[in-house]
Amino acid sequence: MNSQSGCSPHAHGKRVNGDFVRRGAHLFAPCTRKTVAHDPACSLRRHSLRPDTLLTETVSGAAYSSPHPVSRNHHRSAAMSAPYTFYTNPQSRGKWIRWVLEECGATYDVVPVAYADPQVPAGTLTTRSAEFLAINPMGKLPALKAGDTVLTETLAIGVWLAEQFPEKHLTPAAGSPERGEFYRWMCFSLHLEYAIFDRVAEVPSSEARRKGIGYGDFDTAFNTLRAHLKDREYMVGNQLTILDLYYAMLLARFTKFQPVLPADDPVLVPYMERFMALPSFARAMQLDEVLAQQMGA
Ligand SMILES: N[C@@H](CCC(=O)N[C@@H](CS)C(=O)NCC(=O)O)C(=O)O
């Protein structure tokens, strides 16, 4: 993956055995070439994670393939499948979905998916495997299966998940003014992401481009965000919504790992750090760290 892919910021890390690895609270470590060998017995290699166990144990296959998966929230027998199946690679945008799942306290199974690469061993489930393309024809991660429903697009998955846990109050009430603001900043975030990619790719701004492109120009877009967040604790209303987690991840990625935004931004950085201090963030990062090790990343 190159630095414009959105998944592989190569700053602030080190190379280990040819792969770029960043330790600690890494968010979007680069996509590596190592993969999990595909279990020929299953068409999709499926792991039931036991978050409590994983958080306290060193990496072990036993923790990964327990025949009696127990989530943090519900006890399940081996025959019961989790309500959500999460297709991810720990070095993808799936990191944010992991955070959402943890914040919501969801019970979920994880299917690790390697990035397609000519060097991956035959049988490895990759983003180009027929089994995965049946889930997401775009060949992109993350994806989420809930019963017969398959969701792709990170932001859609996260917002939908938040709605599955109404007791967490992570989305404003349908039809409320705050819900309108929620949609506003939700759509805005997608434009921001591409403002950043264009900046990374050094795409020059011009009046014609500014008129046509959704984000206008980089500085106006981020100054608009700064002005909105100045003196506010949350993106919308007076309480945490799932959008705060999304923006925190987006800002972390682009202040720390593809640093097109200043690491000492007086508005964006304190905003982002508030949400990264949530216990669910640390848990999610730790679980992804374990998964990365399991996948040989
Ligand atoms: N619009 C998609 C983008 C997903 C995406 O680009 N995922 C990257 C990882 S962060 C991916 O799977 N890349 C693999 C590929 O394109 O081959 C979303 O928001 O979920």
Image: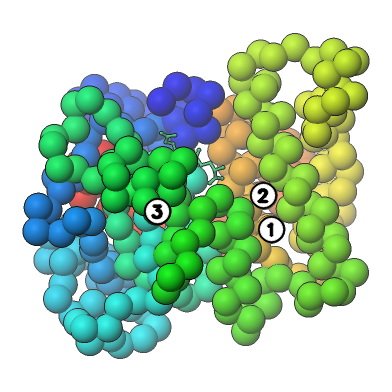
Q: Is residue 234 visible?
A: yes
Residue lying farthest to the left in this orientation: 41
Residue at image mark 2: 247
- Residue at disc 2, secondary structure: helix
Where residue 278 sits, quadrant-wise, is bottom right
The quadrant of the rendering that contains the N terminus is: top left
The quadrant of the rendering that contains the C terminus is: top left
Do residues under tags 2 and 1 come within 8 Å of each other at their CB atoms? Answer: yes
Question: Which amino acid, mark 1?
Answer: Leu
Where residue 137 sits, quadrant-wise, is top left
In the rendered structure, which disc, 3 or 1, sits on the residue that comes first in sequence?
A: 3
Where residue 85 sits, quadrant-wise, is bottom left
Residue at image mark 3: 135
**Which is in the foreground here, disc 2 or disc 3?**
3
Q: What whole-number distance in Å separates the C-alpha atoms at marks 2 and 1? A: 6 Å
Q: Cβ of disc 2 within 8 Å of ligand 1? A: no
Image x and y of residue 236, in percent: 81, 62
Left or right of residue 23, residue 168 in this image: right
Residue at image mark 1: 243
Question: Which amino acid, mark 2?
Answer: Tyr
Q: What whole-number distance in Å separates the C-alpha atoms at marks 3 and 1? A: 25 Å
Task: Tell me if mark 1 has few (under 14), some (14-19) or many (20+) residues whose alpha carbon lies within 10 angstroms of its own.
Answer: many
